[in-house]
Image (cartoon, helix red, strand yellow):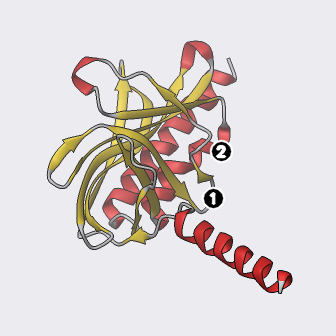
Amino acid sequence: MKNKDCGSAWALIALAFLLLAPRPAFAEKPDSYQSNAEVYTERGEVIGCGLSFVIVWTQDKTHSVGVSGSENLFFVADKKNIYSMLKVGGMYDLAKQPVSYSWVETSVYGKTTSFSAAPVPGDEAGTFIAVKYSDGKTAMIPGQMALVGFTLGLTFGSQTLDNVVELPPSDQSTVQKVQDCMQKLTDRMTAVLQQ
């Protein structure tokens, strides 16, 4: 009889674990999605490229999520270094909420979870910013996001599960603008690094 009781106890523990354990986030599809190429210049030279996005979706069939953000690659010529920056702000159930964490995932780079969160000043408080320096693989992120699509995850405040949405490729015009900018940025980096 002891073995049967022990088996029942293990079954209850396993059931409790399944019910209480955090479940992985489910990637939703967007209700609305718009993306645009980002081009940053200084004294006529391209110093950064990226993709901005505005997304609306329904999370778990009950919560409306609205997000605007961007993922950009910048070149700092005097330091001969690059950095990638993810910036995300949003609304949850039609109210602006602070974004406590966010990431994007592309097929080539993977998730940007290794990026470091950066402090957000004044007017942009509640926006999440994460940066990664000196990682050449980050140069692929904006182009991949535009060309083949990406997954975005974020949490608001003290949420324990990510709100996740899977985005399609950008329109051909946006893809071309991102690729053209990246080519100009690559040419500039090459010229500076060869000095």
Asked whether residue 166 appears in the rendered view, the answer is: yes
Q: Quadrant of residue 129?
A: top left
Q: Give the label on residue 145, or none.
A: none
Q: Nearer the viewer, residue 149 or 28?
A: 28
Q: Nearer the viewer, residue 97 or 118?
A: 97
How far across and down, in percent of the image, does residue 161 sit? Answer: 45, 55
Asked whether residue 23 appears in the rendered view, the answer is: no
* Cα distance in 3D space between marks 1 and 2: 9 Å
Q: Is residue 92 above or below residue 191?
A: below
Q: Amino acid at mark 2?
A: Lys
Q: Give the label on residue 137, or none.
A: 2
Q: Nearer the viewer, residue 29 or 8?
A: 8
Q: Nearer the viewer, residue 178 or 6?
A: 6
How far across and down, in percent of the image, does residue 133 sit? Answer: 61, 28
Q: Residue at x 46, y 69 (%)?
A: 26
Q: Amino acid at mark 1?
A: Val
Q: Residue at x 69, y 23 (%)?
A: 194
Q: Is residue 186 above or below residue 9?
A: above
Taking the image as shown, residue 12 lies to the left or right of residue 103, namely right
Image quadrant containing the N terminus: bottom right
Quickly name the residue at label 1: 108
How far across and down, in percent of the image, does residue 125 sit? Answer: 28, 26
Q: Secondary structure at mark 1?
A: loop
Furthest toward the top, the residue is 78
Label 1–label 2 contact, CB within 8 A: yes
Image quadrant containing the C terminus: top right
Choose the circle earlier in sequence order: 1 or 2: 1
